[in-house]
């Protein structure tokens, strides 16, 4: 090999150029990476408001880049055979240089080697290393000045650091879950009460509240979505209330005997009325029982003040019209039931509103309701940690003034009522019926139309249902119990239902 | 000038003279002539394919005459028996009246054997050539007879008349070093053929190379250097003919059942070496490999049913591989 200087020199020159070009490419790649890292660091520093000086960051990046380049560049090698093969290909030497080099290195005894090497020696001076290994910069290198310019220009712009206030996702999830837990418990309590009082719609709503609570715990939605769901349930609840009010045909008189009113005897108005109705069960009423019933009505009337319905009842009893008296009592009790249900639903609505507000405030207690909490409650204690009874009786919004008639203890009896047992009668909050009546027509008898299909639950087409109800209404209208003045209005009501569709 | 350079120059000149001498009789067919010489120098055999009347027999005869080699011609027919090729033992009688068996050599005992229309003989007779082609010996009645060297079988087959023929089995096809396509002559060549063959004077060929020099050249050829990357290219080329390899092209995957055998690489490299010497070079280059790829590999590719049905020419598949296969192996 020693005597083939041209071939050796050409191989060395090509090797050196190959290594130089490889290192150049590597250096540019490292530079590109470094500039990119510097730009990212600049962006992050500006946007996140890091207090690290940029010069320090650039210095670290430069040191790392130099280290990486030195490590990789040191490993770059150029094989002489490879570069000579490339020269053969580029210059059209028919693999002369590479074959000669390989045979001189490995098969020097081959008889063809002297001739082969001689040819290679003649060809080697013609090797132009710049032609064999031209400088070809990859396109990505053009990104270096662009990135560099961006890195230098960006710090000159006054960029306000970003604030990520809403990044406490775990806290949000916990809050939603807690709210869901609360809603589920409230729903369970409401269902229990509704079952006890036989309030169908309240029971359905209470179950939906529970389901919503369970879903919130399970899915852990965003507070916005949760509030939306609660709002949807609230709307549904309001529709139920509206439906009840429309269907109940309640007069303003119904409010005079609210469900939560408690008499001095400790009995509720509803219980007292039921007792009177029980007394009037027999058609052949003994005189003593009739007198007892009359006394009870009188006592009730005295305690409740002037009540036209009780006055009518008293008149019927005195006239011996037991059928009318019983019907009047049943009507009053049904009114009580409806009023109770509306009131019950109203509490559920308030509970939902409370929950929604609580979510909007990020889990803070509602100041409007917190004042009703007993002062003895230790601060910071989670209402969920308390017993179910405690939670519903003291923390569920709308329950603070709730005292279920007949529910002397536990759920439904507010602390205030239990402690004070205030006999003062309060006017019902329910809106009055819009049914116009003519006065002076005698005793008004109201009939509830119960178990109408609730919204979104209809199984029968409206056309069929209306026809059925029209027939039922006509049958009721033919009865003598319906005052003549109301017949036309009831008829029009059912007709209007059909016309609307 | 070194000795090798002188030898290579002499080699090139000698065989150029042979080609010139053959050209006195054979018009055109330069590639076929070169292929025959490559086969001779590599110790291989050639399969000539072409329609009748293209001068295949004359070509082979001329090669034999120019190289001063014995020549015999066997016309393969369906009733040809192996003994008709190899020879047989016959009863002879000496001067004293004793009778003995004597081996009567068949036409295969010659330097150049022209197996004309080889596909017309039965497979049994075709296979009689197998041992002779591979081992360059024949065995009759347990006695092995060596054939004269150089030994070159040049078989011809007619691609048109396929009725009543026995296509050569793959094992026998693989034993042919090259498959050469004898094409129809051009207008000028045909004009020259007419002139030469319709004149009164018959052209006689001069023997250019003695047998010893041919045998020496056969050894000389094997020393021609081939660089590792050129050898790798030849190997990758053969591997690309196998449909199951990752380097196989789409047409190969679609139409080829089996690719070339290892004999394909051997023939590529050896033929490349001879071609390099013909070109006056001391080593094999990529061009040499590419130049001999088609005759070396075309008969070694076995097409699948789809390839046969669509009439795919294996030479086109090889050309496709050559177009797409890079010289430098991908890293």
Image: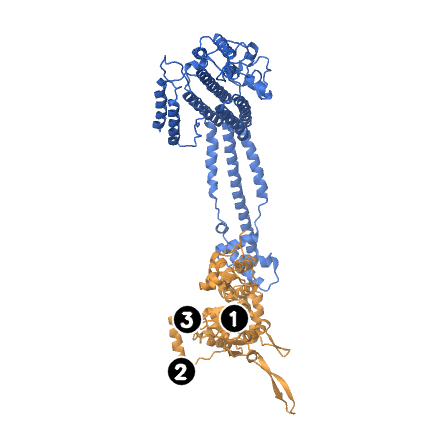
Crowd rating for badge 1 (residues with CA inside 10 Å; few <14, some 14–19, many 20+): some
- Image mark for residue A27: none
| Chain A colour as displayed | blue
Q: Mark 2 or mark 3, which is nearer the start of the sequence?
A: 3
Say which label, 1 or 3, has the lower sequence index. Answer: 1
Q: Can the viewer see residue A316 in this picture?
A: yes
Residue A287 place in picture, x, y as percent? 50, 11
Question: Which mark's residue is nearer the viewer, 1 or 3?
Answer: 1
Quick one: B268 or A337, which is closer to the camera? Answer: A337
Q: Position of residue A201 (x, y in %)?
A: 48, 24
Question: Colour in which chain B is shown?
Answer: orange
**Cα distance in 3D space between marks 3 and 2:** 25 Å
> With respect to residue A384, does B291 lie above or below?
below
Q: Is residue A158 above or below residue B264?
A: above
The residue labelled by disc 2 is B200
* Helix, strand or loop at mark 3: loop
Q: Earlier in the sequence, mark 2 or mark 1?
A: 1
Say whether marks 2 and 1 touch (CB < 8 Å): no
Q: State the image coordinates of residue A328 (x, y, percent, origin top left).
A: 44, 16
Same chain letter for marks 1 and 3 = yes
Q: Which residue is mark 1?
A: B168
- Name the mark nearer the viewer: 2 or 1: 1
Measured in 3D between alpha carbons, the distance from the residue under mark 2 to the one under mark 1, in whole angstroms, is 40 Å
Which of the numbered marks, if any, corresponds to residue B184? 3
Residue B294, x across and y down, in percent: 49, 64
Q: Secondary structure at mark 1?
A: loop
| Dot 2 alpha-carbon crowd within 10 angstroms: few under 14, some 14 to 19, many 20 or more | few
């Amino acid at each position: 090999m020693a005597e083939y200087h041209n071939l050796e020199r050409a191989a060395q020159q090509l090797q050196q150029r190959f290594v130089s070009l490889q290192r150049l490419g590597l250096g540019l790649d490292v530079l590109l990476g470094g500039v990119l890292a510097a730009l990212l660091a600049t962006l992050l520093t500006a946007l996140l408001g890091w207090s690290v000086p940029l010069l320090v960051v650039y210095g670290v990046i430069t040191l790392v880049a130099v280290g990486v380049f030195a490590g990789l560049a040191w490993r770059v090698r150029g094989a002489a055979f490879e570069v000579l093969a490339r020269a053969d290909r580029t210059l059209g030497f028919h693999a002369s240089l590479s074959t000669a080099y390989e045979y001189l290195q490995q098969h020097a005894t081959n008889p063809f080697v002297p001739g082969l090497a001689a040819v290679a020696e003649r060809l080697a001076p013609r090797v132009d290393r710049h032609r064999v290994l031209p400088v070809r910069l990859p396109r990505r290198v053009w990104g270096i000045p662009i990135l560099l310019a961006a890195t230098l220009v960006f710090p000159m712009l006054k960029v306000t650091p970003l604030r990520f206030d809403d990044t406490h996702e775990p806290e949000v999830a916990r809050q939603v879950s807690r709210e869901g837990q609360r809603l589920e418990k409230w729903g369970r309590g409401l269902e229990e009460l509704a079952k006890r009082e036989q309030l169908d719609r309240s029971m359905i709503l209470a179950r939906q509240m529970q389901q919503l609570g369970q879903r919130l715990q399970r899915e852990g939605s965003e507070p916005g979505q949760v509030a939306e769901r609660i709002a949807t349930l609230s709307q549904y609840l309001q529709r139920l209330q509206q439906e009840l009010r429309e269907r109940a045909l309640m007069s303003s008189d119904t409010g005079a005997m609210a469900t939560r009113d408690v008499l001095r005897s400790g009995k509720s108005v509803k219980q007292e009325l039921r007792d009177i109705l029980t007394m009037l069960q027999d058609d052949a009423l003994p005189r003593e029982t009739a007198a007892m019933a009359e006394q009870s009505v009188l006592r009730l009337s005295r305690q409740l003040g002037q009540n036209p319905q009780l006055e009518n009842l008293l008149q019927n009893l005195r006239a011996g019209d037991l059928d009318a008296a019983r019907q009047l009592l049943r009507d009053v009790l049904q009114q009580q039931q409806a009023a109770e249900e509306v009131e019950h639903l109203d509490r559920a609505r308030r509970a939902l509103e409370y929950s929604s507000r609580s979510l909007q405030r990020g889990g803070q207690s509602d100041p409007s309701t917190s004042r009703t909490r007993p002062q003895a409650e230790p601060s910071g204690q989670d209402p969920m940690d308390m017993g179910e009874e405690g939670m519903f009786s003291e923390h569920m919004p709308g329950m603070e003034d709730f005292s279920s008639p007949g529910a002397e203890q536990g759920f439904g009896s507010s602390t205030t009522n239990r402690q004070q047992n205030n006999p003062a009668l309060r006017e019902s909050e329910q809106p009055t019926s819009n049914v116009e009546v003519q006065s002076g027509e005698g005793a008004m008898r109201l009939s509830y139309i119960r178990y109408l299909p609730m919204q979104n639950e209809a199984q029968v087409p409206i056309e069929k249902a209306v026809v059925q109800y029209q027939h039922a209404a006509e049958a009721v209208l033919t009865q003598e119990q319906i005052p003549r003045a109301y017949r036309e209005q009831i008829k029009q009501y059912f007709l209007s239902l059909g016309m609307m569709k | 000038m070194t000795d090798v350079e002188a030898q290579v120059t002499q080699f090139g000149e000698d065989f150029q003279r042979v080609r010139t001498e053959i050209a006195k009789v054979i018009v055109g067919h330069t590639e076929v002539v070169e292929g025959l010489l490559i086969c001779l120098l590599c110790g291989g055999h050639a399969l000539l394919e072409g329609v009748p009347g293209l001068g295949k027999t004359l070509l082979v005869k001329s090669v034999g005459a120019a190289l001063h080699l014995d020549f015999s011609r066997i016309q393969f027919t369906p009733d040809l028996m192996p003994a008709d090729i190899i020879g047989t033992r016959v009863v002879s009688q000496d001067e004293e009246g004793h009778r003995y068996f004597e081996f009567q050599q068949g036409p295969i005992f010659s330097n150049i054997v022209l197996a004309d229309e080889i596909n017309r003989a039965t497979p049994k007779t075709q296979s009689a050539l197998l041992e002779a082609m591979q081992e360059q010996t024949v065995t009759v009645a347990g006695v092995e007879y060596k054939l004269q060297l150089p030994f070159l079988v040049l078989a011809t087959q007619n691609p048109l008349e396929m009725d009543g023929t026995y296509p050569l089995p793959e094992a026998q096809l693989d034993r042919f070093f090259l498959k050469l396509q004898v094409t129809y002559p051009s207008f000028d060549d045909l004009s020259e053929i007419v002139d030469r063959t319709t004149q009164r004077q018959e052209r006689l060929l001069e023997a250019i190379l003695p047998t010893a020099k041919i045998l020496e050249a056969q050894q000389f050829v094997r020393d021609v250097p081939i660089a590792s990357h050129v050898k790798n290219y030849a190997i990758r080329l053969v591997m690309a003919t196998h449909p199951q390899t990752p380097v196989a092209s789409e047409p190969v995957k679609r139409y080829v059942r089996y690719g070339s055998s290892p004999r394909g690489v051997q023939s590529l490299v050896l033929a490349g070496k001879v071609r390099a010497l013909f070109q006056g070079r001391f080593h094999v280059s990529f061009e040499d490999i590419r130049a001999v790829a088609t005759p070396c590999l075309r008969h070694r590719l076995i097409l699948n049913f789809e390839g046969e049905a669509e009439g795919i020419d294996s030479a086109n598949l090889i050309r496709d591989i050559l177009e797409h296969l890079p010289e430098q192996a991908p890293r």
